[in-house]
Amino acid sequence: MTGSPTIGVFALQGDVREHVKMLESCGANAVPVRRLEELAAVDGLVLPGGESTTMYKLATTFGLLEPLRERLAEGMPALGTCAGMIMLADRIEAGIAGQETLGGLDVVVRRNAFGRQVDSFEADLDFASFDAPFHALFIRAPWVEKAGADVEVLARVAEGPAVGRIVAVRQDNVMATSFHPEITHDDRVHRYFVELVKRS
Ligand code: GLN
């Protein structure tokens, strides 16, 4: 692809504006996606943080669930952050009754995995291919409990009770983080994704 890719941010629920800003600072043309025509026009999609149970319900109500699954199955690049990671997981643990995902990543993701005591925390992560640590913000975050053979682990928790837990992954054009890269001022995760979209 030449020029700026158009990257959508799923906008029925979650922290949409922060992602739009980050993507634009990385040279993408960022647009909110709430309707089918908007989904059809994007080269890649961000699924933001928020609440995965609500995202699932709204995606169903707005008729976007199957179209999203189709685009992902056709190879549309996607970045899921926090609730977005849950949405992109093929399987989840600790979902609510009947909660479904879009799928796309061959992983098992556990919702609210870090427990109530540590609802929110910050940590420095070694992120694959970044030459300095990434300061990550976690808010009622999931982690990747199991990753399939084709899934590349991009980051793990480096210390504390959850040491070794997988918090960033990629499989082909689909990537996900347990944390919120859109909230900090470090745009390296978004740059990584914009490059993925350009190469797809
Ligand atoms: N706990 C939320 C969920 O299950 C995710 C939290 C977040 O996105 N910050 O969807």
Image (cartoon, helix red, strand yellow):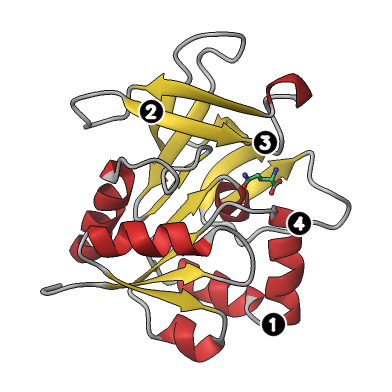
Lower sequence index among marks 4 and 3: 4
Q: Amino acid at mark 4?
A: Thr
Q: Are marks 2 and 1 in contact (CB under 8 Å)?
A: no
Depth order, front residue of 67/111 = 111
Q: Amino acid at mark 3?
A: Arg
The quarter of the image holding the N terminus is: bottom left
Looking at the image, the residue that sits furthest to the right is 97
Residue beneath disc 2: 135
Q: Which mark is residue 12?
A: none
Looking at the image, the residue that sits furthest to the bottom is 37
Q: Secondary structure at mark 4?
A: helix
Q: Amino acid at mark 2?
A: His
Q: Secondary structure at mark 2?
A: strand
Q: Secondary structure at mark 3?
A: loop
The quarter of the image holding the C terminus is: bottom left
Residue beneath disc 3: 140
